[in-house]
Image (spheres, rainbow, N blue to C red):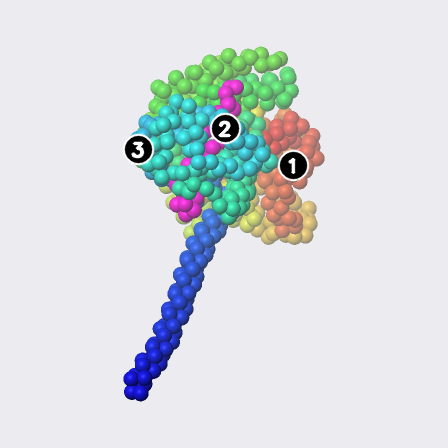
């Protein structure tokens, strides 16, 4: 009985032990299942995290391109930003953009932008060449051609086949070895469009063998962003080129030339390196216009521009300054080199033969920075004088600038203003007079232009006067004077007269200029006295401007004799006075007045046209309007 109980107890214990064992096994299975589920969840989380990280990088890349679209960066910068935005962030080892080119019946591909990495350096060490240096061939890969034609993305693991297609001379086995060492496993080609036309292709080298559907979607979206960025960059480039380019000739315009030469002077001083300016003027343009018409005059001007383009180095700057006048900047060139270049240009122009016109010629002047002068204004003046010397000596020749032997027009103007201010010939506040006189003395030492002083004096009686207007008037009047082949001495007198012609207005009560109601006859008569006041009361006592006074006294005489103060007409009015009248009238129309708003450029020109043969001759007005439309900003 006791033994039976022992066995029964053992049996019961085993049964309970089996239950515990079963419970433990069941628990371990549950734990294992939980562990496996957690491991799967962690793997899925890691995968989703990687996908989210990749999506974020894709969004950042797209945002970067979007930012580029909202900038005014040039196309080259946009393309560089595109390829570099792919570098590293999205697992691409290297990327570049290729563009097709056709030149001289030769069609080829070149790399327009490539990402910054060590690929190029490795490639160079391996093959002793750079992809960017080559005119690449069109690879004979049919699938690649189809992708470009159909504007679809193409992916392949045949990297060596692509590069050997670009550069057939490279050994394909060496290429395969190179790509294995570079850990590049495939490439993706993304065709790019701009304005519905094939622009080129984005090529990316990947460390992955295949391309996922998500990656394909991203690259499709990325391509659309790139195309938009390229289109916008092209528009920015076009607008920028229009702003700095002369529309008739395609050369740089006067505005760009003035900005460039200032930078070039700073560079020349920093590096102690000379540069030369060639001033060039087409001979007999007036005769060409009179005999054949202005259209043929334009043809001759364009022919000059083509000669300058063909004879310029890549670092030279050729600009049309207005009318038939051009300037060329030759960085790093001294006078001897400038003379050689100018003579080459002269001969090339002389060799041009145009329909009806025949052969054309030009007069040239050469001046060198840090050799003839270290002052830009004086340098330009010396080049201009040398060009005029060529004209006086028979045209179709080159003249090297010489130091001025006589006092310059700027010096005359400066001394005149100093005389007016120090001797209180006009009612200007003492403090203002002293400040302006000090500025003039400083200008005299530095040979700077004095337009700002003239602007300040005009503002004393005309608060609506715009700073810089006097300089614009001088430049416009000079262009117009050259249309009439005025000699340099007459042009210099005109420049001085432009600075001084309105000085008589300082003697007229200010309230007359601020009246909003119509002026009375008495008021009009007071204002009409300003040329006489300027000529006879303010300027006559100054000894060195006697030949300027008649120009100023007659600058309100009208072509039909209805002007003032002497009612002279037609050719009896000095041409310099006629030029001042039309220039002054135009700028007055552009300025706001108490009794009217400022006119637009178009409305001002309509008014100029309406007063042909009354205030000015048709010839003067025609030349003036042509300059405003084509040569003057």
Residue found at x 66% / y 40%: 603
User: Which x, y percent locates residue 632?
Assistant: 56, 34
Task: Find disc 3 in the rendering and name its residue.
Answer: 271
Q: Which range is magenta?
A: 86-115
Task: Find disc 2 in the rendering and name its residue.
Answer: 141
* Furthest residue in direction bottom, as rendered: 1
Residue found at x 61% / y 13%: 355
Q: Foreground residue, 164 or 263?
A: 164
**Precedes in sequence: disc 1 or disc 2:** 2
Residue found at x 43% / y 16%: 344
Q: Quadrant of residue 404?
A: top left
Dot 2, how many residues are within 10 Å of its Cα: few (below 14), some (14-19), or many (20+)?
few
Residue found at x 38% / y 33%: 264
**In this picture, residue 610 sits left or right of residue 455:** right
Point out the frontmost of discs 1 and 3: 3
**Precedes in sequence: disc 1 or disc 3:** 3
Dot 1, how many residues are within 10 Å of its Cα: few (below 14), some (14-19), or many (20+)?
some
Point out the frontmost of discs 3 and 2: 2
The Cα–Cα distance between marks 1 and 3, rounded to whole angstroms, is 46 Å
Residue 506 higher or lower than 473, as above or below = below
400 in magenta? no
**In this picture, residue 129 sits left or right of residue 562:** left
- Res. 342 mark: none
């Amino acid at each position: 009985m006791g033994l039976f109980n022992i066995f029964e107890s053992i049996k019961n214990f085993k049964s309970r032990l089996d239950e515990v064992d079963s419970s433990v096994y069941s628990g371990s299975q549950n734990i294992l299942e939980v562990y496996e589920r957690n491991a799967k969840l962690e793997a899925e989380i890691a995968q989703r995290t990687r996908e989210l990280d990749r999506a974020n990088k894709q969004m950042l890349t797209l945002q970067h391109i979007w930012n580029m679209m909202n900038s005014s960066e040039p196309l080259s910068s946009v393309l560089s930003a595109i390829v570099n935005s792919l570098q590293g962030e999205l697992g691409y080892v290297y990327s570049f953009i290729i563009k097709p080119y056709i030149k001289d019946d030769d069609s080829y591909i070149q790399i327009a932008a490539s990402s910054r990495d060590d690929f190029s350096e490795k490639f160079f060490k391996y093959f002793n060449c750079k992809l960017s240096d080559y005119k690449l061939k069109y690879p004979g890969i049919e699938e690649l051609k189809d992708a470009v034609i159909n504007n679809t993305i193409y992916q392949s693991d045949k990297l060596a086949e692509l590069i050997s297609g670009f550069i057939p001379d490279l050994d394909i086995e060496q290429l395969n070895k190179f790509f294995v060492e570079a850990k590049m496993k495939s490439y993706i080609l993304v065709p790019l469009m701009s304005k519905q036309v094939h622009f080129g292709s984005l090529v990316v080298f990947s460390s992955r063998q295949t391309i996922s559907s998500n990656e394909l979607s991203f690259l499709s979206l990325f391509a659309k962003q790139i195309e938009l960025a390229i289109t916008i960059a092209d528009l920015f480039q076009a607008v920028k080129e229009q702003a700095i380019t002369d529309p008739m000739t395609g050369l740089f315009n006067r505005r760009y030339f003035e900005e460039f030469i200032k930078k070039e002077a700073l560079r020349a001083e920093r590096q102690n390196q000379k540069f030369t300016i060639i001033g060039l003027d087409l001979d007999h343009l007036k005769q060409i216009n009179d005999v054949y018409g202005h259209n043929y005059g334009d043809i001759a001007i364009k022919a000059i521009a083509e000669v300058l383009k063909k004879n310029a180095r890549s670092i030279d700057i050729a600009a049309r300054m207005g009318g038939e006048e051009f300037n060329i900047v030759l960085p790093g060139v001294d006078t001897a080199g400038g003379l050689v270049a100018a003579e080459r240009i002269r001969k090339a122009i002389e060799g041009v033969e145009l329909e009806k016109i025949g052969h054309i010629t030009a007069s040239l002047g050469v001046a060198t920075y840090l050799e003839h002068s270290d002052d830009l204004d004086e340098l330009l003046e010396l080049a201009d004088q040398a060009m005029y010397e060529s004209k006086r000596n028979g045209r179709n020749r080159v003249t090297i600038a010489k130091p001025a032997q006589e006092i310059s027009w700027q010096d005359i103007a400066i001394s005149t203003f100093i005389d007016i201010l120090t001797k209180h010939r006009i009612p200007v506040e003492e403090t203002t007079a002293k400040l302006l006189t000090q500025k003039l003395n400083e200008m005299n030492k530095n040979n700077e232009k004095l337009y700002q002083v003239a602007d300040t004096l005009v503002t004393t009686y005309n608060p609506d006067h715009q700073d810089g207007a006097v300089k614009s008037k001088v430049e416009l009047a000079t262009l117009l004077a050259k249309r009439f082949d005025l000699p340099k001495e007459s042009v210099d007198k005109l420049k001085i007269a432009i600075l001084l012609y309105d000085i008589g207005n300082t003697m007229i009560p200010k309230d007359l200029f601020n009246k909003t109601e119509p002026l009375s006859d008495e008021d009009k008569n007071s204002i009409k006295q300003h040329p006489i006041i300027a000529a006879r009361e303010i300027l006559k006592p100054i000894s060195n401007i006697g030949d300027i006074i008649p120009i100023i006294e007659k600058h309100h005489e009208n072509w039909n004799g209805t002007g003032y103060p002497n009612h002279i007409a037609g050719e009896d009015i000095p041409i310099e006075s006629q030029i001042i009248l039309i220039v002054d009238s135009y700028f007055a129309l552009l300025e706001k007045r108490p009794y009217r708003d400022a006119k637009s450029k178009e409305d001002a020109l309509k008014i100029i046209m309406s007063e042909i043969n009354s205030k000015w001759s048709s010839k003067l007005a025609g030349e003036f309007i042509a300059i405003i439309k084509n040569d003057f900003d």
